[in-house]
Image (tube, rainbow, N blue to C red):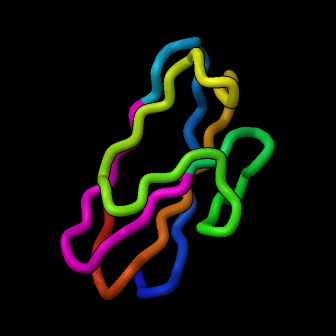
Amino acid sequence: MEHGQYVHFKLCVKEATQVHFAIKSHQGRAEMYIGNHENPFPSKEKYTWSKVGHDKLTVFHLDRSFNLGYYYIGVYGQGQGQVR
């Protein structure tokens, strides 16, 4: 992943349960932004949930923004590196 670039993923949630998101930076730093059906391309400017400076995020089914269906993950690269 290049510095200043986004990589987007999507995940389908079919059950009302907690959803765990995790990333691992091998070099540099990555920021994770999550969107629900209202935000299919989350970014640092617009997101439903975010985790900057940490590598894990959990969304609980009792969260008011939780919904069944697709969740969208935007990973923003800070510095040269690889993200998984």
> How many numbered markers are drawn?
0
Residue at the spot 73% in from the left edge and 52% down from the top edge = 40
Report the residue that reaches farthest toward the right: 38
Q: Nearer the viewer, residue 13 or 22?
A: 22
Seen in the picture, residue 50 relative to 82 is either above or below; the reply is: above
Seen in the picture, residue 30 relative to 5 is either above or below; the reply is: above
In percent of width and height, residue 32 lies at 46, 58
Q: Is residue 81 left or right of residue 33?
A: left
Q: Is residue 12 left or right of residue 39?
A: left
In percent of width and height, residue 16 lies at 57, 12
Q: Is residue 10 left or right of residue 3?
A: right
In percent of width and height, residue 37 lies at 76, 39
Residue at the spot 60% in from the left edge and 32% down from the top edge = 12
In percent of width and height, residue 81 lies at 28, 80
Q: Quadrant of the C terminus?
A: bottom left
Seen in the picture, residue 70 relative to 47 is either above or below; the reply is: above
Seen in the picture, residue 82 relative to 50 is either above or below; the reply is: below
Q: Is residue 26 left or right of residue 3?
A: left
Tell me which segment is drawn in magenta. 20-33
Tell whether position 14 is magenta: no
Task: Locate residue 63: give its quadrant.
Answer: top right
Residue at the spot 50% in from the left edge and 85% down from the top edge = 4
Residue at the spot 54% in from the left edge and 73% down from the top edge = 6
Report the residue that reaches farthest toward the left: 26
Q: Quadrant of the N terminus?
A: bottom left
Q: Nearer the viewer, residue 81 or 33?
A: 33
Task: Locate residue 78: give its quadrant.
Answer: bottom left
